[in-house]
Image (cartoon, helix red, strand yellow):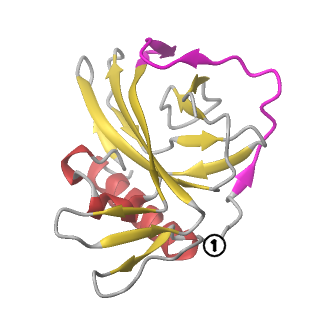
Amino acid sequence: MINKLSKTILAILLIGGLLAIFGCGKVITESTTPLETAETVEPIATTDISGVETDPIETDVFTGDVVWRVLDVSDEGESIVSADNYAFDAKRGKFIIIEFSVLNNSEDTKILYDLNVIDNKGRVFTLCLPAYGYISVERACAVTEIIPDNEYSFDAPFDVSPDSEGLILEVTDLSRTGTKEKAYIDLGI
């Protein structure tokens, strides 16, 4: 039987492997000039979102025993600049950062690992983990345990296509097996 630590290590290795394959950006320093136009890279997947009902930001959204609330959404443009003036360029086009909270009302610890942003064309975008080096790492939401009866606040960076509109955040009940209950939050951009 695989213990909890082994599962966490396996999840981190899986995410690292996905980043190696589908990394979302590159690092530039002060001495280099940012790209005038970002290269458009297709998303990892597409999905049909016709008929999907969405909830507005700043409202509680329930998926099973998990309560989500998007607090703020910002369009950061083609790159994120760190406090020490290093820039991280978007590979797909532009960064959006979603500030949200999540509350686990179940009796079991949940693992936060599968947030997606979907645009009005059905293109699915996953978390851009390398961008955490350029924003508040303390608020990173990648492979995080969500303890029962505790509320957490996070920032989630996404690298989306420059023509992405009608963005929605897909959230789940964070179950590890079976069919996941999903909900969608309209990000207003």
- Looking at the image, residue 136 sits to the left or right of residue 24; the answer is left
x 55%, y 69%: residue: 91
User: What segment is highlighted magenta in the picture?
Assistant: 45-67
- Looking at the image, residue 102 sits to the left or right of residue 165; the answer is left
Q: Horizontal and vertical percent for residue 9?
A: 33, 60
In reply to whether residue 72 is colored magenta, the answer given is no
Q: Horizontal and vertical percent for residue 95?
A: 48, 54
In this rendered view, identify the residue nearer to me: 103 or 32. 32
Q: Is residue 7 depicted above or below 78 in this figure?
A: above
The residue singled out by tag 1 in the image is: 39
x 56%, y 33%: residue: 169
In this rendered view, identify the residue nearer to me: 32 or 170. 32
In this rendered view, identify the residue nearer to me: 151 or 57. 57
Q: Is residue 122 depicted above or below 109 in this figure?
A: below
Q: Horizontal and vertical percent for residue 109?
A: 32, 30
Q: In the rendered view of the protein, which quadrant contains the C terminus?
A: top right
Mark 1 crowd level (few <14, some 14–19, many ≥20, 10 Å Cα): some
Q: Could you tell me which secondary element the residue under label 1 belongs to?
A: loop
x 64%, y 18%: residue: 54
| Majority secondary structure in the magenta region | loop
x 77%, y 32%: residue: 49
- The answer, for residue 147, to whether it is visible in the render is no
Q: Horizontal and vertical percent for residue 165?
A: 67, 40
